Image (spheres, rainbow, N blue to C red):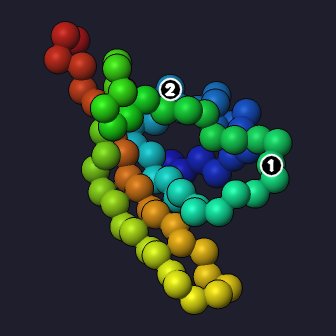
Amino acid sequence: LFIIGGAQVYKEFLSHADRLYMTFIAKGYDADAYFPTIRAANAIGQEWELDGLEDYRFDKEGYTSHVFSNFKRKVNDKD
């Protein structure tokens, strides 16, 4: 099941997800809603681990550099 939200929809369904497919765009935009912050990489108490990365850097005008990132929820060894 893929959830294509708005900020509130993402927030409500994030606890049910075991994978995240995210695009990071290398450009700032004015916005009033954002995807919830996830704990990944080397963060303390990290909950997600990077499982794939595709980096698209463009030098041509009219193209925006972006990165497709795939995250999977870490399995808690204590469960």
Q: Residue furthest top?
A: 78
Which of disc 2 and disc 1 is earlier in sequence?
2
61 left or right, relative to 50? right
Q: Between 58 and 69, which is closer to the camera in this rendering?
A: 58
The reply to whether residue 48 is visible in this rendering is no
Where is residue 40 shown, x and y percent of the image? 38, 34
Amino acid type, callout 2? Ser
10 to 3, vertically: above or below = above
Residue beneath label 2, please? 15
Q: Residue at x 50, y 26 (%)?
A: 15
Residue 47 position by quadrant: top left
Classify residue 7 as left or right of residue 30: left
Residue 31 numbered mark, or none = 1
Question: Where is the C terminus found, in terms of image quarters?
Answer: top left
Q: At which x and y percent is residue 41?
A: 33, 37
SS assignment at label 1: loop
Mark 2 crowd level (few <14, some 14–19, many ≥20, 10 Å Cα) = few
Tell me where residue 31 appears, x and y as whole percent. Answer: 80, 49
Tell me the residue at 36%/67% (across/down).
54
- Secondary structure state at the residue bearing disc 2: helix
Q: Nearer the viewer, mark 1 or mark 2?
A: 1
Q: Amino acid at mark 1?
A: Ala
Residue visible at 45% across and 46% down? 20
Contact check, label 1 and label 2, Cβ < 8 Å = no
Q: Which quadrant of the figure has residue 37?
A: top right
Depth check: 39 or 60 in front? 60
Q: Is residue 58 visible?
A: yes
